[in-house]
């Protein structure tokens, strides 16, 4: 799976309510060995109610740029949510999550 297949997808909870859009992925490099390095494994999705600015990286703290753009995008992404990959039920055109008790 490629990151581009997930980034930009709409995320719905188990009841079908929209949570937001996947703006980035959290990964851990502990997958199968590929050459000299382990492949990355997805551990979580960064989900934002807004997509604007996330594709430019302005939602990250280390990103530098014009202060006005950082302030606007920071306000849009203040409700950024990290969804554990174990909470994902399916990802066909949309990402649907399991009910909260199902991941434990």
Image (cartoon, rainbow, N blue to C red):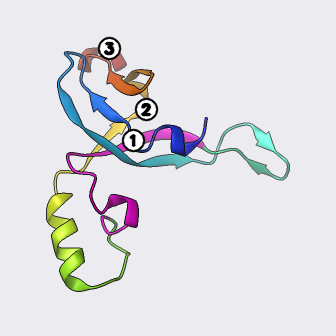
The residue most toward the right is 35
Q: Residues within 10 Å of mark 2 (few under 14, many from 20)?
A: some
Where is residue 102? Give x, y as percent: 32, 14
Name which of mark 2 and mark 1 comes first in the sequence.
Answer: 1
Where is residue 93? Give x, y as percent: 42, 26
The span from disc 2 to disc 3 (Cα, nearest Å) is 12 Å
Residue under label 2, please give it.
85
Residue under label 1, please give it.
45
- Residue at the image position 31 percent from the left and 18 percent from the top: 98
The span from disc 1 to disc 3 (Cα, nearest Å) is 17 Å
The residue most toward the bottom is 66
Name which of mark 1 and mark 3 comes first in the sequence.
Answer: 1
Find numbered disc 1 in the image and state the secondary structure of the residue it sits on: strand
Give the label on residue 102, or none.
Answer: 3
Where is residue 80? Give x, y as percent: 23, 51
Find numbered disc 2 in the image and state the secondary structure of the residue it sits on: helix
Q: Is residue 44 left or right of residue 50?
A: right
Magenta span contains residue 1: no
């Amino acid at each position: 799976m490629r990151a581009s297949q997930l980034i930009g997808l709409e995320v719905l909870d188990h009841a079908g309510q929209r949570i937001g859009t996947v703006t980035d992925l959290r990964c851990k490099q502990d997958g199968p060995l590929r050459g000299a390095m382990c492949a990355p494994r997805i551990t979580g999705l960064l989900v934002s109610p807004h997509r604007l600015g996330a594709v430019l990286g302005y939602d990250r703290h280390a990103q530098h740029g014009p202060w006005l753009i950082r302030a606007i995008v920071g306000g849009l992404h203040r409700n950024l949510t990290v969804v554990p990959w174990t909470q994902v039920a399916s990802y066909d055109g949309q990402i649907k999550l399991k009910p909260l008790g199902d991941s434990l």
